[in-house]
Amino acid sequence: MTAADSSPFDFAAYLEATRLRVEVALDGSLGPERPESLREAMRYSLLAGGKRLRPILCLAACELAGGDSALAMPTAVALEMVHTMSLIHDDLPAMDNDDLRRGRPTNHKVYGEANAILAGDALLTRAFEMVALRSPGVEAERLLAVVGELSLASGAPGLVGGQVVDLECEAKSVDLDTLEYIHLHKTGALLRACVLTGALIAGASEDLLAALRTYARGIGLAFQIIDDILDVTASSEVLGKTAGKDLTADKTTYPKLLGLEESRQRADALVVEAKAALAPWHGSAAPLLALADYITSRDR
Amino acid sequence: MTAADSSPFDFAAYLEATRLRVEVALDGSLGPERPESLREAMRYSLLAGGKRLRPILCLAACELAGGDSALAMPTAVALEMVHTMSLIHDDLPAMDNDDLRRGRPTNHKVYGEANAILAGDALLTRAFEMVALRSPGVEAERLLAVVGELSLASGAPGLVGGQVVDLECEAKSVDLDTLEYIHLHKTGALLRACVLTGALIAGASEDLLAALRTYARGIGLAFQIIDDILDVTASSEVLGKTAGKDLTADKTTYPKLLGLEESRQRADALVVEAKAALAPWHGSAAPLLALADYITSRDR
């Protein structure tokens, strides 16, 4: 949290306060679903903690664009739902076959495969419901644009496409371009949707939207490089998921292609680039600037 | 196709012409996805034929409400995408474990489980993209309402919720209320969304929307009763899927609870009820009235 030290903006307090707002909204986002078992499976993964970076990015982008972040909260929740759905499906036996996620058994380990698939499907559709039917006070044109960004980020042009290429490349050695492709889609697309949707709700200018695309590309790739680095350097206990899995699975990673040191340098350069894009908005961009630093300084 | 005989409206011609329009739109709905394997898996199930009842219901409801059905075509495609996604996921080994669908191997038998799950996810998100980003000429308020209906029909309040209850009730004997709950959600919700979204795009009155809800409830339940009946009476060859599966799986069905004869009577009564709701719109409701008959007279 170096950014907080160099400016009067108290990032740690901002991060915690915003995360708590998000937790409250997430907790209230699931209705009395029937059957109860579906609701439980949805809640289990949606309320499993985590940094809530995606909703926070959305709210911060809304504020940067001059909007009231309360209006973006349903969209922020929707983004976390899509993220959660992708984790549930990626963890399935047919995919990454993971037993542990955020320090707890994965969804299908607790509720079974069928319910895990369906809980993911239900979270994905509920995300669109949040935007379309539970976003009072935002004009329809803006919400429709949010639905568009969310659909592009979630599907074949975004995280599903990235996951398919990722699975195809397992146990194959891939080049840097393909690795970047995977990450820009599997992780980057949704992070971009976070800042774009927040800004769209506030009616952001084209200039700001373009800057946010550059920002998101930088933090998205940096985020994934750090993830690869942590997989090599951190223990399972700190990560809350099975560490060293990428190496075991013979997966191509940044450290494997570039070495740890150059991977770290590349992540840093991407963060510098991301922050530079928001320079014209300096003061009001403080949360997003600090978030960019936070992402590369995190140790878990 | 008895309805066509009793009126000057040529239902057979209408059905075929509309189905062909839908096929063309479906064929053009998937872009040049990367990777190619994802696109193939999506196309395999989306373009597998079928009666295209859902898109046709949507277009017919749009016309009944005085709209240009071309404006509803992207939504009609979206509805078929959601339907296709639900078939792909329902067929998975973790769910109904079906090998055959529409006379061909199921998606996961051809592309593997991981790709089948992801192709379903991609079709679901592409459905929302069709409405939000590929529906030129329709005002945002109406498209947003369509997104809302589509999300409710697809998720926990609709087909996912119905599928969860259905799986929970497998090999259990359930009562008529529960059976109806399952079908109203698993099949009925999406059929309701078909007619409501078509009508919403045309700016339908509240009266018409209410009538269409009644209509959809009737044809939805009738449709499912007929499905249960066919599972008992038809061969796999005619059905294009594994016949007698409900009996093998010890599933509760209408014929099992009510007998074949009463099941057939109940389906007929529901169709009468559905058609009565549209009586005030008689002439312009001809396609929907004929569709209601078609659904109960179908032998496959």
Image: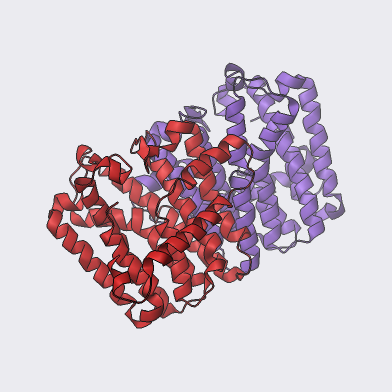
Chain colours: A red, B purple
Q: Image height check: is A205 above or below B107?
A: below
Q: Is A24 rendered above or below residue A103?
A: below
Q: Quick check: B235 left or right of A171? A: right
Between residue A286 and residue B259, name the one nearer to us. A286
| Residue A28 is at least partly visible in this image | yes
Taking depth in this image into account, of B140 and A143 the one nearest to the observer is A143
Q: Residue B295 location, x and y as percent?
A: 71, 37
Residue A175 percent location from the top left of the image:
18, 53
For the point 61% across and 30% down, which residue is it?
B166
Instruction: Tell me what residue is drawn at x 73 percent, y 46 percent.
Output: B11
| Quadrant, the N terminus of chain A | bottom left
Image quadrant where residue B86 sits: top right
Q: Is residue A94 left or right of residue B269?
A: left
Can you name the residue that lies furthest to the bottom here? A280
On the image, the x and y values in percent for residue A144 come to: 56, 65
Q: Please indicate whether residue A180 sits to the left or right of residue B283 in the image.
A: left
Q: Residue at x 27, y 52 (%)?
A: A227
Residue B74 in the image: above or below residue B113? below
